[in-house]
Amino acid sequence: MVNFEKIEEMIDIIAGGDIPESQSFNVFAVNFYLETKMVPLSKYLKLQGKTNKMPKIMNTKKSGELLFHTKKNEEILKFLKKRGYQSVPELNFTCVMLLRKVDSLTNWKKLLSYFEGKGTIEEINNSTRILLLPEEEKKIEEFVKINLGVSDTELNWLKDKIKIIYENKELLRSIKKIAR
């Protein structure tokens, strides 16, 4: 039976970012996963009007799922030991932003890269993105050209400028402010 009061309480704890001192993040995340695994959580959060914290809440559930399945998976436990972890590393609200709907081993590789300082969350997530196939890129370019009414030259200019904007966070924030 689903205990919605307990789920609500746990969601409020996640939104506040303060795990009770009596529990570690890992224990809390596994408990949250077990409480919510029968609930379509994203739909529930939308109905409750809690969409502003949805990524944090959904990633906490995903981390609980990862931790829950890791305890039973000898392959992943051996992988963690080979990388120098005698037990499952303690996660937190920051590192769980790396988790995606992929296999557990891929998620652990990304987490360990972050723990070992091999990049920021954004850099690690971007490094695992799949490049577009040439046909897909052409299709997207045609879509953009049609919808913006631009030529090939103008599209290439726009792509160059957008790349510069995304690489410069301060510039991106400034443009967002003036585009409102």
Image: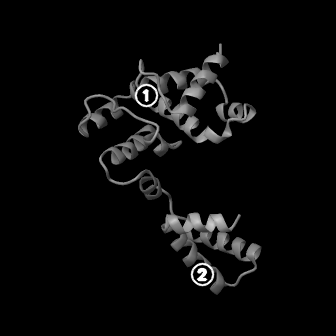
Circle 1 SS class: helix
Q: What whole-number distance in Å separates the C-alpha atoms at marks 1 and 2?
A: 46 Å
Which residue sits at x=38%, y=43%? 111
Report which residue position mark 2 lands on.
156
- The image quadrant of residue 159 is bottom right
Type of residue at label 1?
Phe
Q: Where is residue 26 in the image (x, y as percent from the top left)?
A: 42, 27
Residue 138 image point, x, y percent: 63, 73
Q: Residues within 10 Å of mark 2 (few under 14, many from 20)?
A: few
Secondary structure of the residue carrying numbered label 2: helix
Specify the quadrant of the image occupied by residue 145.
bottom right
Identified at 58% across, 36% down, the residue is 58
Circles 1 and 2, Cβ within 8 Å, touching? The answer is no
1 lies left or right of 122: right
- The structure residue drawn at horizontal position 50% and vertical position 64%, both measured from the top left corner, is 169
Q: Mark 1 points at which residue?
A: 25
Q: Which of the two labelled residues, at mark 1 and mark 2, occupies the earlier sequence position?
A: 1
- Judged by depth in the image, the label closer to the viewer, 1 or 2, is 1
For this view, does 137 lie left or right of residue 82?
right
Kind of residue at disc 2: Asn
Name above or below for residue 164 compared with residue 71: below
- The spot of residue 124 in percent (x, y) is 42, 53
Which quarter of the rendering shows the C terminus?
bottom right
Residue 5 x %, y %:
65, 17
Q: How many marks?
A: 2
Which quarter of the image is occupied by the N terminus?
top right
**Image position of 44 (left or right of 94):** right
Residue farthest toward the top in the current orientation of the protein: 1
Residue under the point 46% across and 53% down: 125
Question: In this orientation, which residue lies closer to the viewer: 159 or 175?
Answer: 175
Badge 1 density bin: few <14, some 14–19, many ≥20, Cα 10 Å? some
| Left or right placement of residue 3 versus residue 107 in this view | right
